[in-house]
Image: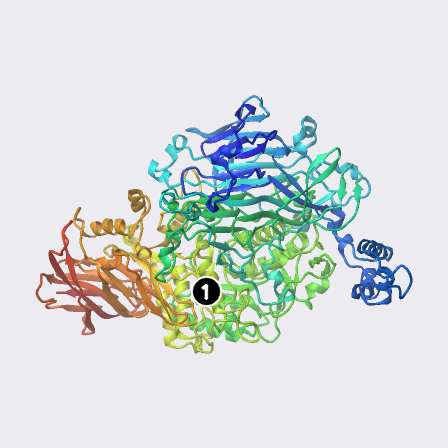
Amino acid sequence: SLYGLKGGQGLRCLAELCPHGVAVYTQAKDCVDFEEQQRISTSDRGNGDECTHTKWSWSFSSQTSPSQWNVTSSNLLSITYRPTHEALPSYTNMSKKREIWNRSVGACFEKGGSACMRMVCGSDSGIGSRKRLSRKKQNHRWKKMKQLITGAPKPIHRIKVTYTVDDIVDMETIVSTFSANDSASTSTSLVDGETESLETNTGLWIRGVGYCHALRVYLKPKFGSYRTNRNDLSDHELIDDTIASDHDAGFELPPMKPWDNSPSPPWDEKDAEKDDRSVGPILTFAIPSQDPLSHSSRVDNKESFQIHKCPPLLWKVEHPPNPYVAIDSFCLMEGKLNLNHHEGAIATVQNPSQSADKPTNVYINGYQSWSFSGSIEKGQPQPKSAMPNVVSEAFNRGGVVLSPSSHNSVVIEAEDGDFWLENITSSTHIVRENGGKYSCNFEQEEDLNEDNAFYKSDMFTCISSNGTNCHRISDGRVLLDEEGGPALIVGFLAQRHQYGVILIDRDLQRYNLSACHEGVVAASSSNSSSHFNGRNSLSSDWAFCQIVDSSCYDEEAMVYYIHASADHNDARPMEKGLTTGWCSWYHYYSDIDHDSLSKNADILEQHQNNIGFNVCLIDDGYMASWGDWNSLKPGRFMKDGGMKVLANTIKAKGMKPGIWLAPFACDKGSKLAKGHPDWIIRNDKGRVANSAHCGKYFYGLDATNPAVRKHVYDTIRRAVKDWGFEVLKLDFLYACCLSGNGKYDNTMSRAEAMYLGFRTIRAAAGDAFIIGCGSPLGSAIGFVDGMRVSCDTGPTWYPAFPLPWWDNGTLPALRGMLRNTLSRAVLGHRWWHNDPDCILLGESTKLTDVEVVSAASIVAMTGGMFLLSDDMEKVSESRLSVAKKIFPLTGVTAVPLDLHSAQNGGMPSILRAWCSDESTVINAQQKEVRKTDGLPSSWSSDMLREQASKLECEVGYSPGMIMNPYSRERSCFAVAPGLGTWTVVSLSNWMDHSNKLSVSFSALIWHSYQDYLSTGTPTSKEIIGDTIERVFDTPGEQTESGFHVFSFWESKYSWVPHQALVGNDPLVKKLAPHETEIFHIKPANPTRPQYIGSDLHFSCGFEVQNFEWSERSVKIELKNDYEKKGSIFVHLPGGRGDGENKLENLSITVNGTVTPDWCVIAKPKIGVHSAGSPKPTHYYHGNIVKVQVSVAGSSGDGDGIVHFNF
């Protein structure tokens, strides 16, 4: 809702936007007294504050839940400007004169102890006088002296212009309606009671969100947003309108898909003469239209619609062109989180302030692949790099919110009647016109900025609550997100126009959502227009805000946002299959040659029968210099053919060849740097922009320059077409958008430069599999197939000396790699295939066996890319067996259950997936499909395409195809018929000492959509009752059959009684430092055989092709695509009653031969009772049989078949 004050009579509702339509109120709809309007109160009632008349512009909340939070924004929009000439290199670059100033005269003044300093700021009565000048006079004389000396440093004059509801010129509503054929909308324009005629228009459509009800708000022109005519610039135009295009450089990029169907802003000459609204910024607010009446034909059923009670708010700003100004940032929301009550808690809690779910954690998303990501407890400092900025800042420098200046100066009139106000401090806002001048409003509450914000997140963030039930943690259990309170997700759907950031205060209740331009000139050139759909204005990406109530999710609060962003950016996860391979980097680093690479390719071929490697990747070290990608190191590679010979060698061994490139980087001594110094990005002082230190400094190439993009295009085409590489690992991609105005086109932001870079890369790569690395995350969605989501792994748990071990940034270490892999698991198979970096198996590292197993477990559970990086000749069989147990990849991504409540420095401890034979039908043709492109039979290319299409359908957040928050397809292992359904849970101890971890029962049992529909919010007892009835197929019969619990890495079995878990007793496990264990929890059925698990594959089910049983026999067919050796565990019923547990005449054959290698390792006694009976009526006996098996991997008849006869 948009609100404004009217004549001191209280708050006035100007417009309201909801999922069922849009309303614009006239004066007759003025709101009553502010304090009487409880729905839109701005007070923080959760803290017991009284209502105040604080002015704010809009509020957003969901009216469907009494426990919901709401947010308000004090302003509609704030824009930070600077004069255009101050954003250009000619103003900021350091000239020779300025260098002379700094080294001589400037140094004299800056040190403050020299005679010249005393001359300027000393006495006015001669040397030796005790009378001093006042501070004001000293500053005045000091400034005047600097201005008199040529080359003195010049300040940047920034001001902040703020728009409130008082600045609204007009509002236009777009009501989306759906018909049998197509969608349409009606559009009205209402301001101060004046109504325009209705007209038919298309509904507002946003890719990834669908059709929306929308409200377009036209703001009055203010400073910086006045429309200017480029013809008025005469001979001193500030922007070069003859910038070359890609066509001029000799190549073309494919056209872009539209992000939305927003009407074009009316900046053109004809519209400008009609009304004043064409020259000010335009805000467009939108909410997905989810009217059940109009959508009922597009959803499966009404029940599936009901789960979406929390639709998001989306909005963006469009700014008119003005070549006289440069824009540093749009502030789209200066927000505050307000707390509401749990109605049920008010009656039982004496202090109402304790009844609210207060924010407790904030999820920080890092700028690029290596940057920290994870959840932080309120009040805890945000983890940052321990390295000085000079060597690390560029790694993590996403969007930057530049504050207004604090220089004392005068008002300067511009030639077009615009003017610049320099007499503004950082606490002053330009808020409205006043007789041709601007008045200043000094706020009592300081704005959030880069200096005073406690937290900063790039692109998106999630503020969450652990809930009010504090007794949950009294026994030391791991907190679960699903047991907590609501969550607030704020961010941008894309990072195509600007890099967006969210600044947050220490209490997690104030936040600033900004789109950062950092000095982009507010005018379009021919180059930027051609690449951004003829853009004639600056536009932000769509901002996103959603308040998700605790009853609307059980695992992933951010799932709606992640899906919407994926579809908005046209992501295609898993479209090209799963990647299992080897990379040369972590053993050889840059010391590679033809022989070492060929040797490892030979060994990988030998292991194809037990680990199906499908990629062999040549990393850094083959080229003479970065930038000179076609120059090989002399004497290390074949002169004739070079990289093409290696690529063909790898292909001949049944793998896809991969190569490493850093297309937007070059070494200082490279031929490229010497031949094209104008391609290198420079900072605002004219020096080469700092790229951060990765063992060396390097240069970043300017992607706004078509000649650079042509160089990148040719480099990638050479690798793909001429050399024959099918996988590209593209590193240090952030280098093309380093901070600095020394670039080719100053009308393009850093994000737009990165976007052009990715379009160039994808156009050149064609169908090649692209792995992004060192890349801004939001820019890469829709362009890469795989994405590094963590810093480099390393041979140690913490960064090794001389690096600071306490670093939380980008330094190589296994801990940092695992932290980001866990915290960014939510992105996997939605935005791309997550690349967690390589697993190091070699004993040459300092990693313990426990740490190697933990790394393998997290990679396997999160479904990431599986790459090794050792000298394969030196890997021991015991370490190699770890890799064999997580192969083949499953394509399943487990859910971190404590992502938003982790208490280990942002490292979740619990991952949950599940296995089921109900969600898939095993196709008989699978058995006929063998190794295809290095994939096992169960992952044929047809199946991969089928699953990719399925995932693509699930990715989109659309009102017509509502995403089910209880959907489990993404985290479900599809297993063979007869295996049943069970939960897979990994538990990790990330402490440096042994620790007992305690997990609630709700983390151990699988939930389903049916459970949600029947119970509202799943609870343990309700779920287990439904589960057991399905197990026994006997409606109304309740059992105490308990659970089979199998720990994979220990190969240990336990039977847990029914009441032990349902009675809210936790699962407790003591783990060594950095240890991970994977548990399988399956409801026990004492009347039939059950497959318990194996030590063959971590899923304990993915290795089985078929499971059949009768009263006296069991037949298990293991997949025989790959060689496997180990043990399987099977439950066989042993009889009923109080007598002896008998398992008579048991005979087991493996691969057609009777085997003596079996034993009974446990005999659970399972009690059964009828509904309502307090005591068991009878018992069943069980036998857990362990059998040693072997699979030759021959894919022949009889291979991998195990028969039980008893």
Residue 440 location, x and y as percent? 70, 41
797 and 939: which one is in front? 797
**Who's the residue at 43% across and 69% down the image?**
991
Whether residue 202 is situated above or below residue 647 in the rendered picture:
above
Whether residue 369 is situated above or below residue 1145 in the rendered picture:
above
299 and 175: which one is in front? 175
**Who's the residue at 50% across and 54% down the image?**
767
Residue 1149 location, x and y as percent? 18, 68
Which amino acid, by three-letter code, is at mark 1? Leu
Residue 72 location, x and y as percent? 53, 41
Residue 458 location, x and y as percent? 55, 53
391 and 588: which one is in front? 391
Q: How many marks?
A: 1
- Res. 418 in view: yes
In the drawing, does residue 1080 fall left or right of residue 686?
left
Whether residue 362 is situated above or below residue 210 in the rendered picture:
below
Report the residue marked by disc 1: 818
Q: Quadrant of residue 134?
A: bottom right
- Res. 258 in view: no
**In what element is the residue under mark 1?**
helix
Whether residue 1176 is situated above or below residue 1201 in the rendered picture:
above
